[in-house]
Image (tube, rainbow, N blue to C red):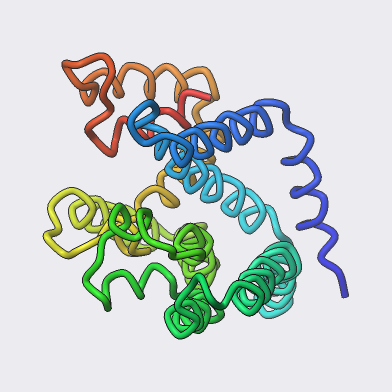
Amino acid sequence: MQNNDEQTHEKAARKRNDIQGLRAVAVIQVVLFHLSLKRFPNGYVGVDVFFILSGFLITMILSCSTQPILSMLINFYSRRIKRICPAYYLTIGLVVLATDLLVLFFDKDSVMNEVQWAMVFATNIRGWYLMTDYAAQLVTYNFLVHTWSVCVEMQFYLIAPFIILLSRNSRIGSAFAILTGIASLYFYCFSNVVDSASFMRSRLWQFLLGGIAYRFSKTKGPYLYGLGSILGSNFFLSADADKLNHPLTDGSTALKF
């Protein structure tokens, strides 16, 4: 049985020009970043924007659902799988096929190891397990390193319904979500773990920030939260105009829209 509420809100999100425009900007940023790290060093901000947008949209979808919890969870996860898995696994399949065709040029065992991690949405965990950061993987023939962000998304989806439902009608739940976000931000800023920026726990605050933006926009007005995010971001801007050196600056990029 299809979740009509969820479909309605997803369609509404797809029709919003501001969200679609922000997605386009984020895509361009990421593409330029990978084309030239030297010319577009801050293109990675596009990924941060995607995570915040995802938190905004998922909070909107789940908060507006009127279905029983079990039915809502089944529909939520089935729709996430249908939206992400076909293209994701097609990409993995093409990588495997290309490796077979060009076996003389690449280490097939290494590629298949990457595939195994990617198949279970754990590419981001692989970097930590092998003690190699993202930049190091970019200069090698790691064909699936870019799937780390999809893995973070899927890992967030595993816990998103429970955090959102817990905080929807409970002050304790809201406090828990806020404290979780603060802990995640702390880990993001101060962790010494290799490639910690690709961990879901260090990105969770961005998803939660998107959720807070949605809740705040519904209760306080979009103009008020937009103005607040613009003013707040000024405290985190780098002294160098060409650098974005603080994660909260990245987050404010999405909130301004």
Residue located 48% across and 37% down the image:
35
Q: Nearer the viewer, residue 242 or 4?
A: 242
Residue 23 position in % (x across, y down): 61, 36
Is residue 25 left or right of 18 when viewed as pictured? left
Does residue 118 show up? yes
- The location of residue 32, given as percent across then percent down, is 49, 33
Name the outermost residue toward the right. Answer: 1
Q: Is residue 141 left or right of residue 80?
A: left
Farthest residue, direction front: 104
- Residue at image location 32% in from the left, 57% down from the top: 134
State the image quarter where residue 109 is shown. bottom left
Residue 20 percent across, percent down from the top left: 68, 33
The x, y position of residue 69, in whole percent, is 65, 75
Q: Nearer the viewer, residue 118 or 48?
A: 118
Total number of numbered labels? Answer: 0
Whether residue 160 appears in this view of the structure is no
Q: Nearer the viewer, residue 129 or 182?
A: 129
Question: Where is 22 relative to 51, above or below?
Answer: above
